[in-house]
Image: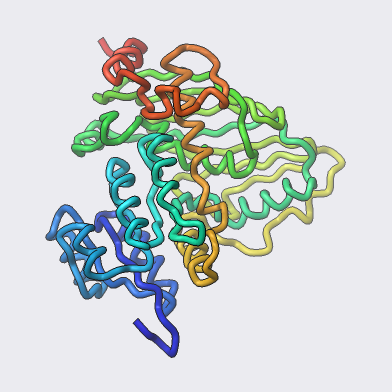
C-alpha cells in the first residue's frame, strides 16, 4: 500500500498465538507507516480471525500457500512451532518474500542449511529473532570487546534456570524429538547461549551431560556443559526446566573486568553488574542509552532497514547457525558421552540431521537412563 507518498512494506504473519500477539503485532505497529500487515493465517481459523479483528488486519487465509498466492507479501513472519519453520520459510522465500522466523530457527542444521539455499544473491533473505542480542548493554559490551577495551575473555557462565510444570509438556508438539527438536537446551536455553556466542564468538569443543529427572518428555529436562572457545575462554552452561527460582544468567570475566547479567525473560541496563579489575577505570563502559531486550522491535527494525536498502540483513538477525550448531554439539556430546569438536558437525554426521542423532528412540533411552525418578 502507498502511505504518505511511499510504498509500505507488505507483511504477513503466520501463526497468531501468544508470541505473535504479545510481540510481533506490537513490534510491527511500532514501525508505523513503514509496514502494513496485509494478512494472517493459522492452523486454528478462529485464532486467525480474532487476531485479524484485534489488530485490524484485512485478510485471513486458511493456509500459507493461499496467502502467498493471493497477497504476494514482501515479508513473512513465522510465529509457529519449530517443526513448521523449514517448509514455511522455503515456501515464502520461493514466493519472493523475505522471512523473519521465531527461534529455534529449525529442528536441525540440515534444515537450516536447506532454507539458506533458497535465498537469492540479492534477496529474498531469511532472519531469525534472537532479541537478546539487541539490548543496549549487550550492544555496548560487544563494542568494548571489539575495541579491545576489556582484554581477553577468560571465564564465563551461561545459565537458563527456568521452571516449566508438567502441563507445559501437554501441548501436543512439545516434548517430542520430531516436533520440538530438543528439550530446554533447544527451546529454553537457546536465548542465553545465543547471547553468549554473540559476545564471545566461535567455540571449538564441548563436553555435555543430560538427564530426564522429573518431567514426562522424550528429551532432557536438564543439561550441563563445558565449552572451550577459539579465544581460549572457558564457559559452563546449564539449561533447566526444573528450577523454581527462575533466572537467566550470563557472566563473562575479562582481564580488565567482569560483566554479569541476571534477568528472566528480558533485560535492560539495570540487570547488568559491572566490576572493573583492581586499578582499572571502567567509568566509560556504560551504554549511552537504555534499550530493553524484552521486545522484538530491534530485530524487526533491523530487517525492515535492510529490506528498504535492498541489502542482506545485519548478521545480528541473519546469522543463527552458530547457536544451532552449539545445541547440536551438546546433544552429540551428551549422547555419545565424550568431548565433541565443532569441526565434527559435517553433513555426514547424524547430529547434523537431528538433535537426537540417528536413532531418536535410543537417544531417549540414553537420556532417561540418567534419571532420579523411580
The quadrant of the picture occupied by the N terminus is: bottom left
> Could you tell me which residue is drawn at 55 percent across and 16 percent down?
339
Q: Position of residue 127 (x, y in %)?
A: 45, 54
Left of 294 or right of it: where is 62? Answer: left
Left of 16 or right of it: where is 118? Answer: right
Q: Nearer the viewer, residue 346 or 281?
A: 346
> Could you tell me which residue is drawn at 41 percent across and 16 percent down?
335
- The reply to whether residue 243 is visible in this rendering is no
Q: Residue furthest bottom?
A: 5
- The reply to whether residue 93 is visible in this rendering is yes
Q: Residue furthest front?
A: 121
Q: Nearer the viewer, residue 140 or 91?
A: 91
The quadrant of the picture occupied by the C terminus is: top left
Relative to residue 115, is residue 337 depicted above or below? Answer: above
> Could you tell me which residue is drawn at 35 percent across and 23 percent down?
356
Quarter assignment of residue 63:
bottom left
> Could you tell me which residue is drawn at 35 percent across and 72 percent down?
10
Amino acid at each position: 500500500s502507498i502511505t504518505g507518498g511511499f510504498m509500505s512494506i507488505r507483511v504477513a504473519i503466520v501463526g497468531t498465538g501468544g508470541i505473535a500477539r504479545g510481540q510481533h503485532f506490537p513490534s510491527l505497529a511500532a514501525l508505523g507507516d513503514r509496514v502494513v500487515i496485509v494478512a494472517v493465517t493459522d492452523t486454528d481459523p478462529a485464532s486467525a480471525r480474532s487476531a485479524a479483528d484485534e489488530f485490524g488486519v484485512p485478510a485471513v487465509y486458511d493456509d500459507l500457500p493461499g496467502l502467498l498466492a493471493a497477497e504476494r507479501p514482501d515479508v513473512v513472519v513465522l510465529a509457529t512451532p519449530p517443526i513448521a519453520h523449514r517448509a514455511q520459510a522455503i515456501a515464502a522465500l520461493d514466493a519472493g518474500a523475505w522471512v523473519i522466523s521465531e527461534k529455534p530457527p529449525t529442528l536441525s542444521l540440515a534444515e537450516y542449511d536447506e532454507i539458506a539455499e533458497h535465498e537469492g544473491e540479492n534477496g529474498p533473505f531469511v532472519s531469525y529473532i534472537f532479541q537478546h542480542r539487541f539490548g543496549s548493554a549487550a550492544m555496548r559490551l560487544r563494542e568494548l570487546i571489539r575495541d579491545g577495551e576489556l582484554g581477553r575473555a577468560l571465564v564465563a557462565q551461561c545459565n537458563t534456570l527456568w521452571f516449566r510444570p508438567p502441563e507445559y509438556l501437554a501441548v501436543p508438539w512439545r516434548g517430542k524429538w520430531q516436533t520440538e527438536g530438543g528439550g530446554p537446551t533447544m527451546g529454553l536455553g537457546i536465548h542465553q547461549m545465543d547471547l553468549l556466542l554473540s559476545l564471545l564468538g566461535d567455540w571449538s569443543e564441548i563436553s555435555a551431560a543430560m538427564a530426564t529427572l522429573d518431567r514426562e518428555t522424550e528429551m532432557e529436562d536438564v543439561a550441563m556443559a563445558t565449552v572451550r572457545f577459539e579465544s581460549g575462554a572457558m564457559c559452563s552452561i546449564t539449561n533447566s526446566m526444573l528450577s523454581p527460582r527462575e533466572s537467566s544468567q550470563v557472566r563473562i570475566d575479562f582481564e580488565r573486568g567482569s560483566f554479569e547479567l541476571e534477568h528472566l525473560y528480558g533485560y535492560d541496563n539495570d540487570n547488568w553488574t559491572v566490576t572493573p579489575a583492581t586499578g582499572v577505570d571502567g567509568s566509560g563502559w556504560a551504554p549511552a542509552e537504555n534499550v530493553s531486550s524484552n521486545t522484538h522491535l530491534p530485530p524487526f527494525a533491523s530487517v525492515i532497514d535492510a529490506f528498504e536498502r535492498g541489502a542482506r540483513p545485519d548478521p545480528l538477525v541473519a546469522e543463527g547457525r552458530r547457536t544451532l550448531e552449539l545445541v547440536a554439539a551438546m546433544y552429540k556430546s551428551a549422547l555419545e558421552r565424550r568431548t565433541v569438536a565443532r569441526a565434527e558437525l559435517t553433513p555426514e554426521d547424524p547430529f547434523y540431521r537431528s538433535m537426537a542423532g540417528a536413532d531418536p528412540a535410543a537417544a531417549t533411552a540414553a537420556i532417561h537412563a540418567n534419571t532420579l525418578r523411580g
